Amino acid sequence: MTDTVFITGVTSGFGYATALRFAKAGWKLILTGRRTERLEKLKAQLSSVPVHIITLDVRDANAVKQAVATLPEEFKSIKTLVNNAGLALAPDLAQKVALEDWHTMIDTNITGLVNVTHALLPSLIATGKGATIINLGSIAGQWPYPGSHVYGASKAFVKQFSYNLRCDLLGTGVRVTDIAPGMAETEFTLVRTGGNQKASDDLYQGTTPLSAEDIGEQIYHIATLPDHINYNRVEIMPVRQAWSAFAVDRD
Ligand code: NDP
Ligand code: 8X3
């Protein structure tokens, strides 16, 4: 039987690259995101494997429930869930950002991820051995930096939720991984800066960030590990990124 993967946020970046990677291996794909046109284009591009697309805002718990309840028969049994949909907004200092942006990040990165996980847990548990939940955390969930505020905190939630799920799912065979990438060139910075293409280009210019394909490859690797192995957390940085010194306020 062909395995099925459910991926959120496939309309660009990691989600898109992950969809391509699983398609290359012949998996059945359930692909979701808010931008329908991009979903349709991707489905047309992946004509060699069965693809079910769903226009879905992960923040909407009822829509998520409905989408899962109405999956076509051949897509109902899920082996892997990739909770990828997410975003950062307002890269300014906490005291300067709009409360609405904080709410959007919490609603997407925390509530959205929880909505999808809750809806798919029964199917993943029914699959049992070898089933995998892969959650997109971030280095920002582990390491603080200015302007990370709610974004980093939302990814710390992803990390702890992943660990806690592991505890509860012990005995079911379902694995859980928090994959925590560092700097990667996608539409992430364009979104974070409110559509500032120059800011995005400047960030990645003159260095070698991770690519979406790098992360898609790692996600596929995690999903296809031998059934008895669980990677709890995988933190990945480009070689050309590292930490910096502590900041000190001086007179
Ligand atoms: P992109 O902006 O390229 O892709 C984000 C994807 O998330 C899009 O497909 C978007 O689709 C989807 N998305 C956003 N909001 C929602 C929503 N409310 N409902 C459904 N889908 C949504 O960014 P990345 O690929 O870089 O980011 C993917 C994940 O990786 C995120 O969780 C991000 O936090 C994380 N990450 C990114 C890093 C980076 O440096 N790029 C590093 C570490 C982690 P649409 O707009 O069509 O809904
Ligand atoms: C995205 C990576 O370093 O911009 O999660 O926080 S970083």
Image (cartoon, grey):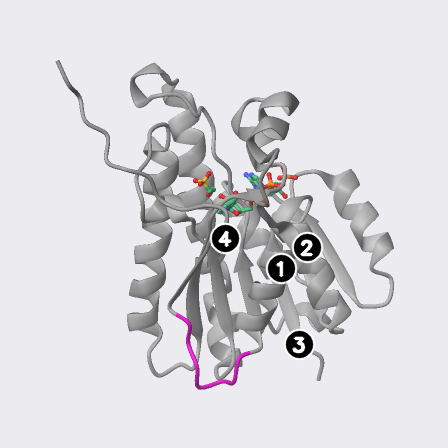
Tell me the kind of residue under disc 1.
Gly
Q: Please state which of residues 117 and 230 is positioned toward the viewer in this rendering.
A: 230
From the viewer's perspective, is 246 left or right of 125? left
Magenta region:
225-231
Query: How far is disc 4 from disc 3 in space, using C-alphas?
Result: 34 Å
Disc 3 to disc 1: CB gap under 8 Å: no
Query: How far is disc 3 from disc 1 in space, using C-alphas?
Result: 17 Å
Residue topped by disc 3:
3
Label placed on residue 239:
4
Determine the secondary structure under disc 4.
loop
Q: Please state which of residues 174 and 209 is positioned toward the viewer in this rendering.
A: 209
Residue topped by disc 2:
17
Label placed on residue 216:
1
For mark 4, does the 10 Å Cα neighbourhood hold few (<14), some (14 to 19), or many (20 or more) residues? few
Q: Residue at x 37, y 33 (%)?
A: 148
Query: How far is disc 1 from disc 2 in space, using C-alphas?
Result: 5 Å
- Give the mark nearest the N terminus, 3 or 1: 3
Q: Report x, y in % for residue 244.
A: 33, 39
Q: Report x, y in % for residue 234.
A: 43, 63
Disc 2 to disc 3: CB gap under 8 Å: no
Tell me the kind of residue under disc 2.
Ala
Q: Is residue 72 visible?
A: no
Task: From the image, state whether disc 4 or disc 1 is nearer to you.
Answer: 4
